[in-house]
Amino acid sequence: MAVTGIEQRVFGIVSGTGLFGGGYSTLITTIIDKISIGSLGNASSFGDLLTARTYLAACGSSTRAVFSGGLDSDGDPVRVMEYTPFSTGTTITTFGDLTYDRSDVAGCGNSTTGVFGGGFDTGDMNAIDYITIATPANAVDFGDLIQARSDLAACSSTTRGIFGGGWVSSVYVNFIDYITISTPSDATNFGDLSLERAYLASCSSKTRGVFGGGNDSSYVNTIDYITIASTGDATDFGDLTEPRDGVSGCSSTTRGIFGGGYTGAESNVIDYITIANTGDATDFGDLTVARDGTGACSDCHGGIG
């Protein structure tokens, strides 16, 4: 049953919108799906990106979603950014460009600033870019990750951005880096994930970051978590409903969402967790089209507070 109205306040479930854009199904797509994070059910159609792409990144303020980078239909990394209001579908507008063409990039941010880190062009990249979400313009250099890598995941609190996992020259890694979102500079070592893996997803509350799924030479269902304000290694949280890579994550301040992915075939599965409580994920519903490599974001995540 959907949780609405007064029940949202009683049970502490923050309602908001999550978007999953692009990805690969039978081809690289422009599809954007929408979910209501505070309830359960299948995704609905929201609109379409201007540029079909997969393995892109996304970030969101309380009003606007921004989709960045990715691999286009010709198999080329791109730097294009596009944005849309969360409140209306079909209104997709060019935002600007990243500093470099890149796919397999990760995005996070707070209520004002979006940050995009890592990725792949002719090799793994360490570049971190930032944007002011309310002001369409080209991205600006923020600093560098501690290690150039692609296929990583990112999440944030209101003050810190976290980048975890990835792929470095054909090797899976468990590195976690962090940045202070308000202060452009190079990333700092945070600790390690519980498992070396790439093609994973992340989401966060105001205090806790969660990483789910991925590939460590086989599909994994591992979920682990960190306390964002401190540093240290990740701790086991539970498992996704099915092992998969190419999964994407978004959240409210209480509920984490993991959507899509690849299990040997594209998946339409959406899982959810309660971020404050460890345990296995539960079925939420389905994407409109089974696919992997989407960019996901929300208007109510831990970076917004």
Image: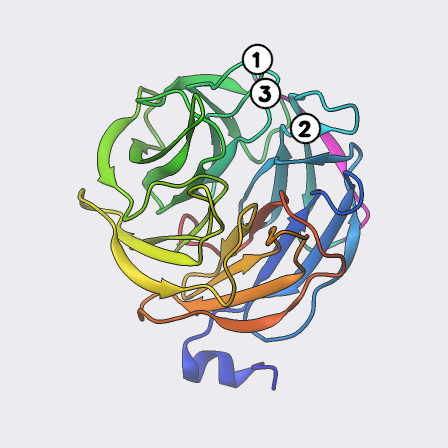
The answer to which of marks 1 and 2 sits earlier in the sequence is 2
User: Cα distance, mark 2 to mark 3?
Assistant: 13 Å
Q: Give the CA separation, mark 1 to mark 2.
A: 12 Å
Can you identify the residue that label 2 sits on?
71
Q: Which mark is residue 28?
A: none
Please tell me which residue lies in front, 24 or 171: 171
Give the mark nearest the N terminus, 2 or 3: 2
- The residue depicted at 17 percent of the width and 44 percent of the height is 232
Kind of residue at disc 2: Leu
Residue 132 vertical position relative to residue 12 in the rendered view, above or below: above
Local crowd size for mark 2, using a 10 Å CA cut-off: few (<14), some (14–19), many (≥20): many
Q: Earlier in the sequence, mark 3 or mark 1?
A: 3
Nearer to us: label 2 or label 3? 2
Residue located at (47% from left, 19% from top): 124
Q: Which mark, residue 98?
A: 3
Indicate the amino acid at tag 3: Leu
| Quadrant in which residue 284 is drawn | bottom right
The residue identified by callout 1 is 122
Q: Nearer the viewer, mark 3 or mark 1?
A: 1
- Hey, what amino acid is under mark 1? Thr
